Image (tube, helix red, strand yellow):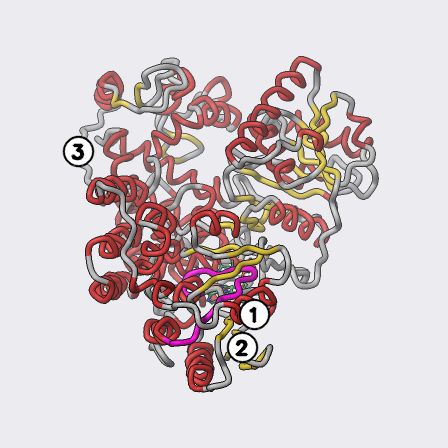
């Protein structure tokens, strides 16, 4: 849909009308085609302006149409008609111009943007490439290198940067539309050919091949198996090496290799899943549509350890006033210096001023009396957290929300020591908390809809992807991670090496394999949790043999490694060797291999050949199976919630969609069969027993993922 008006006598104003983001659906493309034709034919019309309704220029092609057969006028000739026309066309960009939306603007002869507008070609984040001329026109407009950057990263660009790059001609704080209409009148009669980007040569550096090879190498490393970024480089290469039409041909050919790919489907699923998890609901019938968050202006963070510092920085970056609390002056001073340094470093990177004025430090809990919301981030010990919650419950104002950053302790147990259990929720951040996008908001059995709404909304204000989960040990993310970690240790026992396991998982697309990840987060963290759980150390049941705990198989390998003083990166020795304490480069450690051989001999285990497929199946199918259990017992609301938790919190490759989407891609019958196979081979490992939900779905013909909620024991939100 496109509205046609004639303004200022001679300017045809074409307005895209397809709320909320004026996506280029078939109807909008038809509307544009008809209105442009009309304007070109109307002798009274001397120039045109294209804009979008509701302060948004255009969010690009309509992603919802990708799964349907193509209908309506195609984009490429529609945009070519605008560029080739003999009347100047000005794009008035307000809000967003992304993907096909920016490509439409690049087909126009001039671009005027509002100072708050953002532009970009994010197709690569959908597993695609800009296929309406973006890979050919953008390089011709701004040069090869900046075009490669924008197209292979898909990053959003502010109006100011777009002006500097030359994407837009003018930026205004006033109405971009009004300025565009004036401009359209002024440029009538000026030579149009030089404004037709398809006619230009691409400005290139002397060593074009060098730049393209270097970019391809960087992109391949970053891609971790994703196809689209590589196709983007190949398409932009054509803009430097081929005439326009041949380049467009190349663009279409490459797009054809991506459009129907499973990777594109996975990444588009993530696009909509990321938006779906924001629409939460509770079994009480409360949901994001009928539960209003309470305004929060003053926040406090209790504990300035690694997590507390990251959370404080995230809050200040979001412009919130923060009271940072520590137990003693020494700890407070250390926290103060580190938080201030983190804020200054971050501000420097963004060329901004650090908002240290928003930050206050204290050791006096009484200063919390006017705080709206408190986030507790003290050491992961239930007794200590209970003591803190008891104190907070007495010093804070009656309606203050008490939130805990625990990564898996019982939120209800904490709420029970307060006088306001309905105002207690979990806000589980991921390290580093000012960087990682995921926030697990944990709904306790007595948390009020208002507390949930406020925590979810605060997450959005911090730029997080907030996912609402139920209360159980490890919530969703860490609960599913447990069988994944256990399988990895079992594979070492049976003959694998840390490098083999990590290699298979990195080939799958994870930025880091499980053993490198453990070394990064510190082996002593898991060791302390296993000690508290009585799996190792003084509280072990003396009747339990070394490789059995609580009636099931257990691998003491990680404990034995810690007992050797191997704590990971922090002391330079873990499952790998590092050049120095805190070093980042992991090198295979022959003494770990020797230790594993001795361990197998000691326990009478004959090592066997293990291939990468078995690693992927055992680690990921065990994790997925626990995902199905989390769905069935009401801790995760839907597959999208699990997938967004893993994509934004655990490095699950976006081009694989997330654990549950991946299970659907592999085929639920195969996941079930393989789990049954491994269960048979390892009867002493209960978490390999296929989840009842998985069996129900397979028995019902493996319905598509958007139908899985219908098979949950309590379909309508079970939180
Ligand atoms: C040929 C061409 O080369 C190729 C092939 C392409 O062009 S491929 C397409 C490339 N374009 C993109 O990648 C941009 C995608 N969109 C965004 O980045 C953002 O939406 C936004 C523009 C920055 C606005 O953010 P927002 O925070 O204000 O709102 P929202 O919550 O995100 O979105 C509001 C609602 O609009 C829906 N929506 C947004 N963009 C859409 C799109 N392009 N198609 C269909 N629906 C879209 C979204 O699902 C949500 O729906 P619901 O959840 O309410 O039901």
Is residue 358 positioned above or below 20 on the image? above
Is residue 277 positioned above or below 65 on the image? above
Magenta highlight range: 85-101
Helix, strand or loop under label 3: loop
State the separation of the CA atoms marked 1 and 3.
74 Å
Q: Does the residue labelled 2 lie within 8 Å of ligand 1?
A: no
Q: How crowded is mark 2: few (under 14 residues within 10 Å), some or many (20 or more)?
A: many
Task: Report the side of 170 relative to 70 (left or right).
Answer: right
Front position in the image: 293 or 10: 10
Residue 348 in percent (x, y) is at: 54, 31
What residue does disc 2 label? Answer: 11
Residue at left 43%, top 68%?
190
- Residue 49 shows up from this direction: yes
Q: Check contact, mark 2 vs mark 1: CB within 8 A.
A: yes
Asked if the stretch drawn in magenta spans residue 129, the answer is: no
**Label for residue 258?**
none
What residue does disc 3 label? Answer: 608
Asked if the stretch drawn in magenta spans residue 94, the answer is: yes
- Residue 264 shows up from this direction: no
Among the two numbered marks 3 and 2 on one chain, the one whose residue lies closer to the N terminus: 2
Task: Report the side of 84 relative to 591 (left or right).
Answer: right
Residue at left 32%, top 42%?
222
Please identify the quadrant where the C terminus is shown.
bottom right
Residue 508 in percent (x, y) is at: 28, 45
State the separation of the CA atoms marked 2 and 1.
7 Å
Front position in the image: 7 or 449: 7
Helix, strand or loop under label 1: helix
What residue does disc 1 label? Answer: 181
Is residue 81 positioned above or below 336 on the image? below
Residue at left 46%, top 45%?
648
Is residue 339 positioned above or below 171 on the image? above
Helix, strand or loop under label 2: strand
């Amino acid at each position: 849909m496109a509205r046609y008006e004639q303004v200022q006598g001679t300017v045809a104003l074409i307005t895209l009308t397809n709320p909320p983001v004026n996506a280029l659906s078939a109807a909008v493309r038809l509307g544009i085609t008809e209105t442009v034709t009309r304007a070109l034919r109307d002798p009274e019309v001397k120039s045109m302006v294209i804009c979008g309704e509701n302060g948004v220029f255009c969010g690009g092609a309509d992603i919802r149409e990708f799964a349907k057969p193509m209908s309506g006028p195609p984009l490429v000739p529609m945009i070519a008609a605008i560029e080739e026309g003999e009347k100047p066309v000005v794009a008035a960009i307000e809000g967003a111009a992304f993907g096909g939306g920016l490509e439409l603007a690049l087909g126009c002869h001039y671009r005027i943007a509002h100072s708050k507008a953002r532009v970009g070609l994010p197709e690569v984040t959908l597993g695609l490439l800009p296929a309406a001329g973006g890979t050919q026109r953008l390089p011709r407009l701004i040069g090869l290198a900046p075009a490669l950057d924008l197209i292979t990263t898909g990053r959003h660009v502010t109006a100011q940067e777009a002006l500097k790059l030359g994407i837009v001609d003018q930026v205004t704080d006033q109405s971009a539309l009004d300025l565009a209409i004036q401009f359209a009148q002024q440029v009538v009669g000026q030579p149009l050919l030089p404004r037709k980007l398809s006619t230009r040569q691409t400005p290139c550096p002397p060593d074009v091949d060098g730049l393209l090879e270097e970019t391809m190498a960087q992109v391949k490393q970053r891609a971790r198996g994703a196809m689209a970024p590589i196709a983007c480089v190949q398409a932009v290469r054509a803009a430097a090496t081929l005439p326009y039409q041949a380049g467009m041909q190349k663009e279409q050919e490459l797009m054809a290799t991506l459009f129907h790919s499973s990777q594109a489907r996975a990444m588009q699923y993530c696009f909509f899943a990321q938006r779906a998890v924001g629409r939460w609901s509770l079994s009480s019938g409360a949901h994001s549509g009928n539960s209003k968050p309470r305004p929060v202006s003053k926040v406090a963070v209790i504990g300035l350890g690694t997590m507390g510092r990251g959370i404080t920085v995230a809050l200040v970056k979001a412009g919130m006033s923060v009271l940072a609390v520590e137990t003693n002056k020494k700890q407070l001073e250390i926290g103060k210096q580190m938080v201030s340094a983190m804020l200054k470093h971050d501000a420097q990177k963004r060329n901004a001023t650090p908002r240290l004025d928003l930050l206050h430090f204290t050791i006096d809990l009484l200063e919390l009396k006017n705080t709206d919301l408190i986030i507790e981030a003290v050491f992961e010990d239930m007794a200590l957290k209970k003591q803190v919650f008891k104190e907070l419950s007495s010093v804070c104002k009656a309606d203050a929300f008490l939130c805990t950053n625990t990564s898996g302790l019982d939120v209800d147990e904490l709420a029970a020591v307060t006088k306001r259990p309905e105002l207690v929720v979990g806000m589980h951040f991921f390290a580093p908390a000012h960087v990682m996008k995921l926030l697990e908001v944990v709904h306790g059995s007595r948390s009020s809809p208002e507390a949930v709404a406020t925590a979810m909304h605060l997450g959005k204000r911090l730029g997080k992807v907030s996912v609402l989960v139920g209360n159980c040990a490890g919530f969703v993310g860490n609960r599913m991670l447990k069988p994944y970690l256990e399988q990895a240790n079992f594979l070492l026992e049976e003959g694998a090496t840390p490098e083999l396991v990590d290699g298979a998982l990195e080939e799958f697309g994870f930025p880091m394999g499980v053993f490198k990840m453990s070394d990064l987060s510190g082996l002593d963290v898991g060791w302390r949790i296993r000690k508290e759980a009585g799996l190792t150390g003084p509280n072990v049941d003396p009747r339990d043999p070394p490789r059995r705990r609580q009636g099931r198989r257990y691998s003491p390998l990680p404990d034995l490694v810690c007992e050797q003083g191997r704590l990971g990166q922090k002391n330079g020795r873990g499952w790998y060797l590092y050049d120095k304490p805190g070093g980042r480069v992991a090198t295979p450690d022959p003494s770990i291999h020797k230790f594993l051989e001795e361990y197998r001999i000691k326990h009478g285990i004959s090592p066997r050949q293990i291939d990468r497929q078995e690693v992927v199946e055992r680690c990921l199918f065990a994790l997925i199976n626990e995902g199905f259990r989390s769905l069935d017992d009401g801790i995760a609301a839907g597959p999208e919630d699990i997938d967004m938790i893993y994509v934004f919190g655990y490095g699950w490759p976006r081009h694989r969609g997330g654990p549950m989407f991946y299970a659907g891609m592999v085929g639920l019958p195969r996941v079930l069969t393989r789990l049954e196979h491994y269960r048979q081979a390892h009867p002493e490992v209960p978490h390999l027993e296929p989840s009842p939900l998985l069996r129900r779905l397979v028995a019902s013909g493996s319905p598509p993922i958007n139908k899985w909620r219908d098979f949950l024991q309590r379909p309508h939100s079970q939180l």
